[in-house]
Image (cartoon, helix red, strand yellow):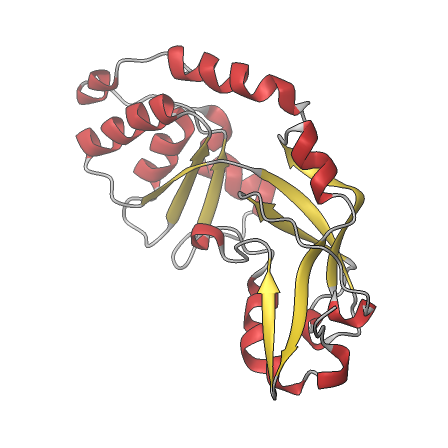
Amino acid sequence: MSLDSDHLPEVREQYERLPYPPCDPEDDNRRLVTTWLDDLPMVIHYCFGGAQSFARGFRVLVAGGGTGDGTIYLAEQLRATDAEIVHLDLSEASINIARRRAEIRKLENIRWVQIYGAIFGAEADLTHPLAFGYNQKTVSLFKANKVFMEKSKNPYATPFMYGPKSMQSGWVSRENGEAIKNSAAVIVNTVGNGRVINIADNPNLRAFWLGGVKLFMNAIFFGRIIDAASGRTDE
């Protein structure tokens, strides 16, 4: 779901003034708030058909975690495992309340992420070495900056690009929304005998956004096999 970016300042301001859901973090000294949708037996039954032990390597994203009811309940239930709960929200005030609640409970299995930006779908050339391992033409990347790269005249030098309607979720200003249309997400440059791979966005954002991990690894391991003639030179 996307929201017209003109509403973003008002939305963020609202949740900074009125963190949601309203709560006093000190109440966690006395009781645990339970949320039925985050009850592990229910999650195991409906999401995993009863075949999940959470014993090793489990990660869960709580998007729009607010003041932390769901996050704290999950973290408490998974305390004895190596699971990681990623709490994502746009409100600093809400995250601070959730952090305090975790401190009171001595929970150390939560990663805190304050979100800025939006998710865009980049169209990938699946024949390109940088797209190795992807089997769908649209790769979701998280944009949290104002870097907009012009496409190369050589199409092979732009293996990932944003189309005219690439926004998938989040908020973006009208100005930046226009700037990203038909821009390059990745540019391959030929510099001397080497290749310089420019990626407009952080493909490994805070180690929780995994859509660009293959792109990042391909740039490291396959960059050298990209034909020099296919890279962008001075245009």
Image location of residue 61, percent across then percent down: 48, 42
Question: Can the viewer see residue 78 in this picture?
Answer: yes
Q: In which quadrant of the rendered view does residue 35 lie?
A: top left
Residue at 74% across / 65% down in the picture?
Answer: 158
Q: Is residue 117 left or right of residue 151?
A: left
Residue at 59% across / 61% down in the picture?
Answer: 199
Q: Measured along the vertical axis of the image, is residue 230 above or below residue 112? A: below
Image location of residue 190, percent across then percent down: 66, 79
Front residue of this view, candidates 185 and 102: 185
Front residue of this view, candidates 34 and 3: 3
Image location of residue 87, percent across then percent down: 41, 37
Image location of residue 3, percent across then percent down: 67, 24
Q: Is residue 156 left or right of residue 148?
A: right
Residue at 70% across / 69% down in the picture?
Answer: 131
Question: Can the viewer see residue 49 in this picture?
Answer: no
Q: Is residue 213 left or right of residue 153?
A: left
Q: Quadrant of the N terminus?
A: top right
Q: Is residue 66 left or right of residue 78?
A: right
Q: Quadrant of the C terminus?
A: bottom right
Q: Measured along the vertical axis of the image, is residue 211 above or below residue 36? A: below
Q: In which quadrant of the rendered view does residue 69 lie?
A: top left
